[in-house]
Amino acid sequence: MSTAASKLGTRLRVQKGRRTVPGDPRIDTLLNMVMSLTSEVAVLRDRVDAHERLAAAGVVPAPDTVDAYDPDDAALKARAAQRQRLIAKVCRPLVAEGSAEAAGAAETH
């Protein structure tokens, strides 16, 4: 099992089928869209976290209070861990494809 798979705690899955053409602009556009959406999800999760922490503190989570919320170190660490899990999950197919290509290149040399 590769180190990436052991870090994720699961087997990496490699998609089968027709391989994409390197440099295909449609693939690049799709990847940019996915990464932009991933960024938006991360921001929304941070805002939900702020809502939950404010509500737990007895503060009414209005838009102004959420914008002004300053997370403590524990919240920052929890958010960073959550972002890393999100990135690992979204990028898993790319990591698996890169690992498979690297293994194939090593076998041919």
Image: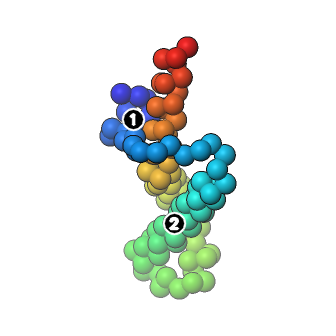
Q: Residue at x 41, y 45 (%)?
A: 17
Q: Nearer the viewer, residue 39 or 53?
A: 39
Residue extending farthest front: 18
Q: Nearer the viewer, residue 29 or 10?
A: 29
How crowded pointer 2 is (Cα within 10 Å; few <14, some 14-19, many 20+) is rated as some
Q: Which residue is mark 1?
A: 5
In primary-sequence order, the first of circles 1 and 2 is 1
Task: Please name the colour scheme applied to the rendered image.
Answer: rainbow
Q: Which residue is mark 2?
A: 41
Give, as a three-letter code, the residue at label 1.
Ala
Residue 10 lies, with reference to residue 27, above or below; the image says above
Q: Secondary structure at mark 2?
A: helix
Give, as a three-letter code, the residue at label 2.
Val
Is any atom of residue 100 visible in this view?
A: yes
Residue 2 lies, with reference to residue 57, above or below; the image says above
Spatial CA distance of label 1 from label 2 is 24 Å
Is the residue under label 2 in contact with that under label 1 (CB below 8 Å)? no
Is any atom of residue 85 visible in this view?
A: no
Residue 52 lies, with reference to residue 81, above or below; the image says below
Give the label on residue 94, or none.
Answer: none
User: Can you give x and y, in whole percent of width and height, for residue 76 in the image?
Assistant: 53, 56
Quarter of the image for the N terminus: give it.
Answer: top left
Quarter of the image for the C terminus: give it.
Answer: top right
